[in-house]
Image: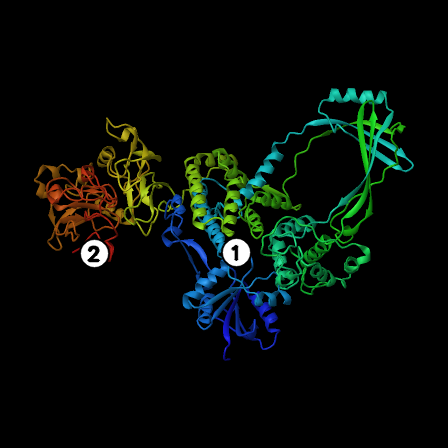
Amino acid sequence: MSGTIKVLNVAEKPSVAKSVSGILSRNQGLRVRDGRSRFNRIFEFNYSVRGQPCHMLFTSVTGHLMELEFEDRFRKWHSCDPADLYHAPVRKHVPEDKMDIKRTLEEEARRCQWLVLWLDCDREGENIAFEVIDVCRAVNCHLTTRRARFSALIEREIHHAMQNLVDPNQWFSDAVDARQEIDLRIGASFTRFQTMMLRDKFVIDSATDDRNLVLSYGPCQFPTLGFVVERYWEVQSHEPEEFWTINCSHKLDEGVATFNWMRGHLFDHTCVVIIYEMCVQEPTATVTAVRHQEKRKYPPYPLSTIELEKRASRYFRMSSEHTMKVAEDLYQAGFISYPRTETDCFSSRTDLHLLFWKLNLIGMPCWILKAIVQEQQEHPEWGSYAQRLLDPRTSLWRNPSSGGHDDKAHPPIHPTKFSTGEHNWSQDHRKLYDLVVRHFLACVSQPAVGAETTVEIDIAGELFSTSGRVILERNYLDVYRYESWGGSMIPTYTLGQQFIPTSLTLDTGVTRPPPLLSEADLLSCMDKAGIGTDATMHDHIKKLLDRFYATKDSNTRFSPTKLGEALVMGYDDMGHELWKPNLRSMMEFDMKEVSVGNKRKDEVLATCLQQMKACFLDARLNKVKLLEALAVFFERSNQAAGDDNHAAGEVVRQCGLCRESSMVLKKNRDGNFMVGCLGFPQCRNAIWLPGSVLEAAVTSNICGSCNPGPVYLIQFKFRQLEIPPGFNANHLGCIGGCDDTLRQLIEICGTGSRMSARGRGPTTTSSNVQRSSSRQGACLYCQQTGHFSNDCPSQFSGSRNSRSRTNSQNGEPSVPCSTCGTPCVLRTANTANNRGRKFYSCPSQDCNFFIWEDDHNNGSGGRSIPRAGINGSASNSSRGGGGRGRFGQNGARAADVTFVSATGDPISGRRCYVCGDPSHFANVCPNRGM
């Protein structure tokens, strides 16, 4: 094959790859082989592009090849503050389930010179095209990349597209990238926020188990819910009001004319009664006006995606999601054009048959439209109408009018292949194909023509009117059976004619609320407000139903569920318009600007995310409004908040140990408070707070001393009887190491780390139970009851050095643990700042006792305080003064209270607290117990 180039063609779906390959090869010399993915086969055939011989390799992807997601350390719900998601790093990568497709593309791209992209010709398809380009060019940077643009899987479209390849549109792809990132960051932050805050606090009725319930938030989904709730509130708030009106009728041999009061109706009963009595007293009616005029009912504009969904919902009660699924089936089978289009006019910019524009016609060439009609002449239902359309003597043909929308990518939806119904079609396939064909025939037809007569009469100074209509020419109504134009005959009247009405009645009625939104109404609201695109609107509606935020009745009318209404009510009470379409409309406008090159992607991302982060932070400060709204509809839950280590809390600061997750305020089942890392169990950093804390809440105030910040202050309320005199029961404190009051209370009251909540009884592990049963609660030193070993008088009466004992097994010095009594042997630190310094630590996994040897000898005493908590100085003054704490704080204050590892070394990463080796943890240290 000298001079032949190899061309890798990639379609968006396997079915499209098969169809296009069959058309281009004319099913001659077509060979098929399997790729890495058994669903995405490879078709091979020869073809010529503008005289250049080509060996074509045709394969496919299955929608998006790549996914956008946060980096691993931000993916878990409890790994960070949701506010961090607005600037957390994201990456676009090929997921595991599509790696076989990626490998196929890489293998084929290595031996090809051209890459031709046959993705759907919309923004989403353009973005998928650049995903394919990234994969292929990574292994072959010399590929020539081209784009095939087509709107129907029919022969003339496909051959024209192959012979007129264009460049991929980077702007279209950038617009999708911007939308994906905005939706990911906003959706993830609000979803995590409201789910973690609300799910366990209320008994929420839903279709899923409470523990798996996700209260999702979507930038398009929530305004869509807002439309449903707003209309529901209008209906619920409506108060019926009685009104009165006067009706008049006149019966003649020609028929009956019903005259309507031109005032409509009045709400003042007395006023209406007076007017009615005047008419009864002078009942003679005088004809004051007779008007005859010609009326026209125009056919619909060419069919766009939104109109297709609305009309299918209105005519067949088909959901928008199902409508698009059926339309996609018809498109892939070649019976209709591409079903995702905003275009509702046949113009030169939407016609893909560009070679015909040498005719200089404004709009799609008339003969091409007539060729489409000609294909339908043999149909048993509308074939005769198609013949009339093509007959110049009937004057039925009319060039289609324009709806004013052109996405510059696809023409309106129209039939591309004749069919009387295929054997594998469902009723919905038949209905939708019929609608597309009849709609196309209607939009190239003359409007219906009618003669309308309006008569006005005067009775005692009050005006009444009636009208009648006669249809003179039905025209498009003959084929478009979904619409009617009711006509009614009225008797003939002449100007000045007088008569006595047959009846004159005073009737009453009540005002009625507007109906709930139908699916067609909801689509109209979304389209008008710019929520979503023609390709995504049906997905947003489906999510409302899937998330149990709304329900749809048999008449396709939507009502919010209690959950949906409560969420909207909560955000509404905050004063935010997150459930209104305004914010999203501006985002959609910005993304359109990106798609035409008027704005840069980075510029739009920065503006939108900055705006939405401010809304998020404000919503979190006003979260009580959301809680109050949920309480209106749901009972409070009695269940525990779940695993304490995984429970969501209020962010206090960034974790200084893992430096990836946030530290949040938590309360365990025993009632003790702690500040723990959301990265648990990978990171076990925790700061236990005084056991005397009754209530604690994170405030928006930031400590001015502690670094790195921000460190949010906590409002404490202590049990007055459990704190010494002179301490206030209410205290605004900092856990960053600068708070003397908090440090003193921890020293006096202890922490809640291993202590049972006061008044709740002990909670011990199995090992503690064994130890307590063997010692019967006696002091470890004097074996007397009534006090604990850390308060034993005998330990303070002798010399300081008398507290050290010798391990009976190996003769090494040891001290008993003040909490569990286990002998703590003397160890040697091996860290940079404390190398060679000796310390005692409890070997029990359930105990955190620690003390330096020199501190023990000086009588400072050891305490059972978590190693990640508030502890003693990292090193005494003789060893260079206070070191940098876990959060990197320096200064005199940090020398007294700082956050350190068990060896006293400043924590900048995880390491063994026994020997200081960062390659393992203490529980597997070879030096442990020596």
Q: Quadrant of residue 854?
A: top left
**Residue 84, placed above or below residue 420:** above
Expressed as whole percent of the image width and height from the top left, the position of residue 752 reads: 28, 40
Residue 917 is marked as 2
Q: Which structural element holds mark 2?
A: loop
Which residue is rendered at x = 52% and y = 60% of the image? 63
Q: Between residues 523 and 338, which one lies in front from this camera angle?
A: 338
CB atoms at circles 2 and 1 under 8 Å apart? no
Could you say which is closer to the camera, residue 290 or residue 324? 290
Going from N to C along the chain, the mark reached first, 2 or 1, is: 1
Extreme left residue here? 799
* Pointer 1 residue: 124
| Quarter of the image with the C terminus in it | bottom left
Q: Residue 293: image x %, image y %? A: 81, 39
Residue drawn at x 58%, y 41% is 228
Q: Amino acid at mark 2?
A: Asp
Residue 666 visible in the picture: no
Q: Determine the residue located farthest toward the bottom in the rendered image.
A: 1
